[in-house]
Amino acid sequence: MFWASASVATKFGVQSAAPLVLATVRFLIAGTGMLLVAYVFQKGNPLPTGVEWKRLTIFAALNTTIYLGLFVLALKQVSAGIGSLSTATNPLFITLMSAAFLRRPLRWQEGAGLLLGLLGVCVAAYPLLGQAYATVEGLLILLGSMLSISAATVYYARYNWRLPNLVINGWQVLIGGLLILPVTLLTTDISATSFDGRFWASVGWLIGPVSVLALQLWFRLVRADAVKASLWLFLCPIFGFAYSSVLLGEPITLYTVAGTVLVVGGLGLGRKTAVATD
């Protein structure tokens, strides 16, 4: 529920600010806030050491800088509902990347599920292309963001992390913000940003329920089982389309329903495979 709300909150935020400005402010404030809690209020949490800094930086680049940087850029051109629907394809990409990088056997059901999920996103987006709710460029940027977060999830699952979830989350969000900061300063006219109530409400929601609460829950699930955890993301399009319809007035059509059914069907194939593997 919280993760699906990110698309709508971002759509509100980019009405007041350039996408990268919104992302950078969010990352720097959220990362700093979580680290203050971890080291000032909780006490006793360890600092990263040695190879942990390298792993955190790689994870931050994939999970925050590239994924969320591309995601906010895409939502300037794509509806919030499509943004939520794309998130549900992550389990399919995670399964594919697990086969490639973790030497996990790839079954035909998983390949078919991936194709079915991508087809579902295309079907749901098709009528929106001619209604100013989506562009081909936006969909391609969105695809890049999904590949990045899937790679981040597989990378995270490769290691046994000594650090607590809050420490990992705080550092990876702050490092991700520092990595994207030069790009924002070089490519964006910050003076055109309107730091109004809508902007700060968007940033506040993206920091609290999304960056802190949703990611804390996500890390807890991924530590148990990355593939099974990712299957919960199939709920994102259901909540996402509901939020975007009620709050933004975005249309829900037969294409929307058909595309969502295809995505969930593709995830169903992956779920059967995951259960069979156990």
Image: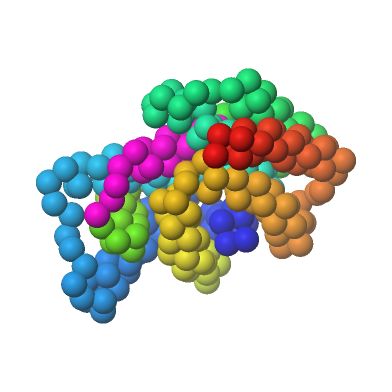
Residue at horizontal 13%, vertical 51%? 49
User: Where residue 143 sits in the image (x, y, percent)?
Assistant: 55, 32
Residue at horizontal 80%, vertical 34%? 127
Q: Which residues are magenta?
A: 142-162
Foreground of the two, 17 or 206: 206
Residue at horizontal 67%, vertical 52%? 235
**Could you say which quadrant of the image residue 109 lies in?**
top right
Foreground of the two, 6 or 212: 212
Farthest bottom residue in view: 41
Q: Where 224 falls versus 115 (above or below)?
A: below
In the image, 165: left or right of 20?
Answer: left
User: Where residue 185 sits in the image (x, y, percent)?
Assistant: 31, 46
Residue at horizontal 68%, vertical 33%? 269
Foreground of the two, 163 or 103: 103
Farthest top residue in view: 108
User: Where residue 156 sits in the image (x, y, percent)?
Assistant: 36, 43
